[in-house]
Image (cartoon, coloured by chain):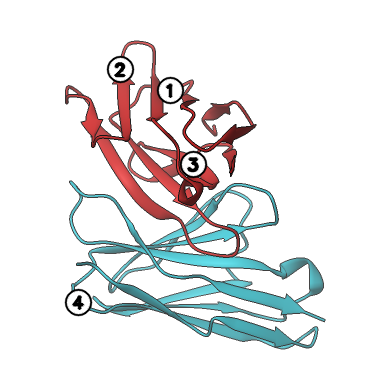
């Protein structure tokens, strides 16, 4: 199979702190990884596309200085929410692409609550 | 622009059939279908490629009309486990998710 993990599953933090979320493809090398955000009762919205060894491509309206993405290897991408505020509270989901002819494989998601 | 799904929500009794539609304003190369349970990540159901045949298995299948830029997901003899929110995803270099359809199956 194609398994993607995320860590942590849940994080609660105080306003102003930074939070790092890891996304790993466990049994395959991912050519590309994606980061999504989902607010309650809404669809998944793509935040950025990440390729190993290069800068992430951010979607319109997503602040790249606030959501730092590092794609260190073909199996690991990290999303850091810097100076988090309550409005950043959301469900963050990563996905990994093994082959362009296939679909994306999703991680289990990370629920972030900023107090 | 985000694909539009219809209906927004539907409630069925176990054993009934459902059709979920996905419509895009842009030309499509492929359509992906996912089901998401509350609090969980989306689970891949199937992918339909341009020029490909209708895909699926006995009770969950889908079609893709390239000219109309539409796709439909068919759920036959629905089971309680089918409850969740269904999303179509259209790929134009990246996956753009539809507005979602919340499906509730009741006994």
Res B75 → quadrant: top left
Numbered mark located on residue A105 in the image: none
* Residue at image coords 32%, 11%: B67
Q: Residues within 10 Å of mark 2 (few under 14, many from 20)?
A: some
What residue did someone put label 3 on?
Answer: B87
Earlier residue among tags 1 and 3: 1
Numbered mark located on residue A27 in the image: 4
Q: Secondary structure at mark 4?
A: loop
Outermost top residue = B67
Vertical relation: A28 (above or below) A11: above
Chain A drawing hue: cyan
Q: CA distance from mark 1 to mark 3?
A: 17 Å
From the viewer's perspective, is the residue at label 1 or at label 3 nearer? Answer: 3
* Residue at image coords 64%, 84%: A11
Earlier residue among tags 2 and 1: 1
Chain letter behind tag 1: B
Outermost front residue = B107
Chain B drawing hue: red
From the viewer's perspective, is the residue at label 4 or at label 1 nearer? Answer: 4
Q: Foreground: B31 or B18?
A: B18
Q: Residues within 10 Å of mark 3 (few under 14, many from 20)?
A: many
What residue did someone put label 1 on?
Answer: B26
Q: CA distance from mark 2 to mark 1?
A: 10 Å
Q: Position of residue A97 (x, y in %)?
A: 27, 59
Q: Position of residue A34 (x, y in %)?
A: 41, 61
Q: Residues within 10 Å of mark 4 (few under 14, many from 20)?
A: few
Q: Left or right? Give the position of A56 relative to B3.
A: left
Q: CA distance from mark 4 to mark 1?
A: 34 Å
* Residue at image coords 55%, 51%: A44
């Amino acid at each position: 199979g194609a398994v993607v993990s995320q860590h942590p599953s849940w994080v609660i933090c105080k306003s102003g702190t930074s939070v790092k979320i890891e996304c790993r493809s466990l049994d395959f090398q991912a050519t590309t990884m994606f980061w999504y955000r989902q607010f309650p009762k809404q669809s998944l919205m793509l935040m950025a596309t990440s390729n190993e060894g290069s800068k992430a491509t951010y979607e319109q309206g997503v602040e790249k200085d606030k959501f730092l993405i590092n794609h260190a290897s073909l199996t690991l991408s990290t999303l850091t929410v810097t100076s988090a505020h309550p409005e950043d509270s959301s469900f963050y989901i990563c996905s990994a692409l093994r082959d362009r002819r296939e679909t994306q494989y999703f991680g289990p998601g990370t629920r972030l609550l900023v107090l | 622009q985000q694909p539009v799904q219809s209906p927004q929500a539907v409630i069925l009794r176990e054993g009934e059939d459902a059709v979920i539609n996905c419509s895009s304003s842009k030309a499509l190369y492929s359509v992906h279908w996912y089901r998401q349970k509350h609090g969980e990540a989306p689970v891949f159901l199937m992918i339909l490629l341009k020029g490909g045949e209708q895909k699926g298995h006995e009770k969950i299948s889908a079609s893709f009309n390239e000219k109309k830029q539409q796709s439909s997901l068919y759920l036959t003899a629905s089971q309680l486990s089918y409850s969740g929110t269904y999303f179509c995803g259209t790929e134009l270099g990246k996956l753009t998710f539809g507005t979602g359809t919340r499906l509730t199956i009741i006994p």
